[in-house]
Amino acid sequence: MSNISATAFADTKPHYNILDGLRGIAALTVVCFHLFEAFATSHLDQRINHGYLAVDFFFILSGFVVGYAYDDRWKKMTVTEFLKRRFIRLHPMVVMGAVIGAVMFYFQGCSVWDVSTVSISMLLVATLLNALLIPAAPGSEIRGLGEMYPLNGPSWSLFFEYIGNILYAFFIRKLPTRALSVLVLLAGCGLAAFAIWGPLGDICVGFAMDGVNMTGGSLRLLFAFSAGLLLSRVFKPIHIKGAFWICSLAVVALLSVPRIGGSEHPWMNGLYDTVCAVVFFPLLVYLGASGKTTDKITTRVCKFLGDISYPLYMVHYPFIYLYYAWVKNENLTFEQSLPGAAALVAGSVILAYLCLKLYDEPVRRFLTKRLLPRQKL
C-alpha cells in the first residue's frame, strides 16, 4: 500500500503500490504500440502487436480499484457524490487531451488525412465535443478515420469508463457476489465469442460508433470492469516476492506478442486475446495486489509510474498523429525516425508529469472544493 496523495479525498484508502506501477508500465507500452502504427499496413504486421489489450487491463484495474475504494461506503455516500468523485478524478485530463489535440491539429497533415480542409469552426466544435466526451457521429468527424474522438483517439476508452462507473453506481454494485459472478461469466463468454468467431479476429475495437466497435467495446468493458469488481470482493492476498518486476515483464510480454494465425486463421488471435483478457490480466491484478514494495527504489518507481499513467495515456496521442504525419510525409523507416520516436516517448512522459502537477492536481483540488464542499482534502 502507498501513502495518500496530496489531491486525494480525505477518506481515500491507501493505494496498491504495485497496481499503480503496472498501470504506468501498460501506459508506456501503449505509447510504443501507437508509435508502430505509423509503419503497419494492418493489425497483421504491427510491432508490439497486442498493445490494444492494455485497455482491457486498465478496465480490470479500474473495476478492482473502484470496488476496493467504494463498495463499503454506500451507506454514507450517494450516487451523485460517487459520480462527482469520478468526474473530478477523470475529466480534467479529458479536457486537456482535447485541447492539446486541437492545438496540434493543423501540424498533422499527411496523405492519409488532409487537415487543411478543416475550418476553424469545425475544429472548435470537435474540441468542444471531445472535451465534453460526446462522440463524433460516423462520417462527420474531422479527421475522416471514423474515430469517436478525432482530436485525441484514446478518449474512447474514457467514454466506456464513464459508462462502467454509471453501471456500477446504479446497478452492478447492488448485485450479490454470486450474481456478479454470473455476469462476469456471461460477459466473458460474449467477449470470447466476439474475439474468436467475430469479424476481426481480435478485440481491437471500441473507438468508433459503428455496430462492431460498439458491440466489442461494450463487451470489453462489461467483462473487464465486472471482473475487476468481483476480484476486489473475493480477493485474499498471497505471499509473492518481486511482484512488480514479475508482473511488469508479463504485461510487456503479453502486449508485445506478434499477431497469431495470420489472415488465414484469425480465430487463433481471437483466442489469444480472450486468454489474455479473461485469464492472464485478472491473474496479474491478483498477483500485483498481493505483492508489496519492500525497497525505496521500487516504491518510488511505482509511485512515479502510477502518477503519470493516466496523464500519459491522455496526452500522448496528439503527438502520435504528428509523428505519423512526419513518417508518411518523409517516407521514413523506423530506424530513420528513431530519434523522433525516442523524443516523443520522453517528451510525453515529461508533459504528462507537468500536466499532473501544474494542471490536473490543482484542478481536482478546485473541483473538490466546488462540487464536494463538505469533503476535506
Image: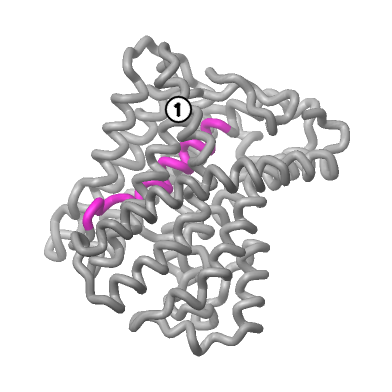
Compare residues 50 and 152 and report the one nearer the observer: 152
Residue under label 1: 302
Q: Check if residue 103 falls in the magenta segment.
A: no
Q: Give coordinates of residue 243: x percent, y percent.
A: 35, 20
**Residue at point 24%, 48% (across, down):** 271
**Residue at point 51%, 73% (across, down):** 105
**Residue at point 31%, 37% (across, down):** 251
Image: magenta residue range: 47-65
| Residue 170 makes an appearance in the image | no
**Image vertical order of residue 232 relative to residue 35, above or below:** above
Compare residues 25 and 272 and report the one nearer the observer: 25
Q: Give coordinates of residue 238: x percent, y percent.
A: 39, 12
**Majority secondary structure of magenta residues:** helix
Is residue 101 rendered to the left or right of residue 284? right
Compare residues 172 and 16 and report the one nearer the observer: 16
**Residue at point 40%, 24% (across, down):** 288
**Image vertical order of residue 250 relative to residue 147, above or below:** above
| Residue 13 makes an appearance in the image | yes
